[in-house]
Amino acid sequence: MNSEFYIYNNEAISVVVFAGLMKIVKSLDVARVFIVLPLLLDDRIVRKLSYSYNSMDDFFDDNAKLLVGFNERYLELLPITLNTINILNESKTIKILNDKIIYIENNKFDFNHDFGIRANKIVSVILNFSVLLGMQSTDLLYKNLKVQI
């Protein structure tokens, strides 16, 4: 993994981003977990997510150029995603139950902090992202993103 990529996309920002998403969606199947960070840690995609889209298909169609290379980001972020899930699980912010990641209400994660400009920008689009994420099946998301495992 490119060290600059890792420094820019690390567990600290990933924990904030993923906890913010889980606070909204409450539950996420494990397969979807792995597409979250490759999308939300891409600054170009975050800028586009500040706009409204009618469907995930519209988002994909309008932003096809930004999704080129998604599979590489997906693979590079697998260790960070796993570490992020582990950190949030150990801190009792989420729990893993069967094939679901579940947000634990009344956890000790404090969302009232200023997490920095980049994290705040990402957190500001999480609601739009969560709506789009819920519009497609996991299989179709993986197909449209051309994920090769």
Image: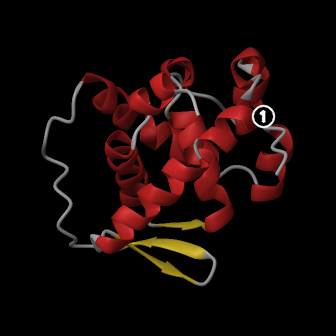
Q: Which element type, helix, strand or loop, lies under badge 1?
A: helix
Q: At which x and y percent is residue 68?
A: 77, 22
- Vertical relation: 66 (above or below) 9: above
- Vertical relation: 105 (above or below) 142: below
Q: Quadrant of residue 64?
A: top right
- Residue at the bottom extreme, as displayed: 98
At 40% from the left and 56% from the top, the residue drawn is 24
What amino acid type should be assigned to the residue bearing mark 1? Answer: Asp
In the rendered view of the protein, which quadrant contains the N terminus? top right
Q: Is residue 50 in sight in this rendering?
A: no
Judge left or right: residue 63 versus residue 34.
Answer: right
Q: How is the image coloured?
A: secondary structure
At 74% from the left and 51% from the top, the residue drawn is 136
Number of labels in the image equals 1
At 16% from the left and 55% from the top, the residue drawn is 110
At 83% from the left and 39% from the top, the residue drawn is 144
Q: Which residue is mark 1?
A: 57
Judge left or right: residue 95 versus residue 111.
Answer: right
Q: At which x and y percent is residue 56?
A: 71, 37
Q: Is residue 111 in sight in this rendering?
A: yes
Q: At which x and y percent is residue 98?
A: 60, 84
Dot 1: few (<14), some (14–19), or many (≥20) neighbours within 10 Å?
Answer: some
Judge left or right: residue 30 versus residue 107.
Answer: right
Q: Quadrant of residue 67?
A: top right
Q: At which x and y percent is residue 54?
A: 67, 33
Judge left or right: residue 66 versus residue 17.
Answer: right
- Vertical relation: 73 (above or below) 131: above
